[in-house]
Amino acid sequence: MPLPYSEIVMEHFRHPRNVGRIEDADAKAIEGSPACGDMVAVYLKVDPEALRITDVKFESYGCASNIATGSIITELAKGQTLEEAKEISWKQASEALGGLPPIKTHCSVLAVDGLRAAIQNYEERHGLVKERVPTTIGVIRKRLKRVMNPMTGLDLVRTKIVKDIELNEGRVRVAIDLPADHQFAANIREEIREKIEPLWDVRKVVVEFTE
Ligand code: FES
């Protein structure tokens, strides 16, 4: 039985706004949903003086609800300051879309998490993080929970391929239980580095493959 989507959801799904990537983005984030294994990427251009979002685009590997939410929140975020855009919630997005079926809540949460992660990425890359909490193994593990294992659609931690994490004076070493010549090894390494390197007190990230 088809899900009861509103007209607005269907319109944004069929004609999503701001789809694509920004090649010279000032910040970007890829977020995965633990609920369904789908992913969303969000790219930002930011006016560094006003800290205002001048352009935002997204790529969705998710469902109609995710695409429609990505479309509506990028519309809402464009022209807003980073602080304003941080306040956009999945509830607000869902209301703007005329409601989403409850079973699809995680899809709009994923899109909003993607936007927030891109904003966080900008702040980390530009020294704008206000609370400089020292990085711990726990913080790194939490970030690795946001990197998908493309073989399963679940995150690296849940699929138990993170074998070891070391942290020593800003140097991070992550051991992944995969052969170095595995088809997804380069991609996983890049995503781990993208998630960990922006941490304010991290100087180097080394990803090792164990087999
Ligand atoms: Fe995965 Fe909607 S089911 S994003």
Image (cartoon, grey):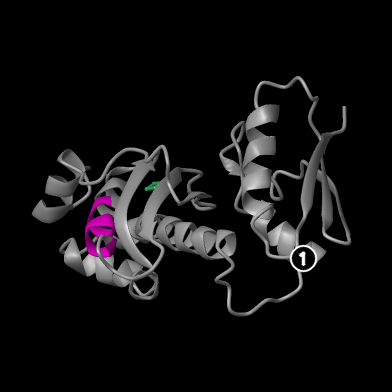
Q: Which residue is mark 1?
A: 138
Q: Is residue 211 magenta?
A: no
Q: Report x, y in % for residue 195.
A: 63, 52
- Please name the residue shown 33% across and 43% down the image: 63
- In the figure, 170 relative to 157: above or below? below
Q: Report x, y in % for residue 17.
A: 20, 46
- In the figure, 83 relative to 156: above or below? below
Dominant secondary structure (helix, strand or loop) of the stretch shown in magenta: helix
- The residue most toward the front is 49
Crowdedness of circle 1 by 10 Å Cα count: few (<14), some, many (20+)? few
Dot 1 amino acid type = Gly
- In the image, is 183 to the left or to the right of 170? left
Q: Is residue 6 visible?
A: no
Q: Quadrant of the N terminus?
A: top left
- In the figure, 175 relative to 33: above or below? above
- Please name the residue shown 26% across and 60% down the image: 78
Instruction: Tell me where residue 79 sits by quadrant.
Output: bottom left
> Which stretch did the figure color magenta?
71-77
- The residue most toward the bottom is 131
- In the image, is 180 to the left or to the right of 103? right
Q: Report x, y in % for residue 205.
A: 77, 47
The local secondary structure at tag 1 comes to helix
Q: Is residue 47 visible?
A: yes
Q: Is residue 75 magenta?
A: yes
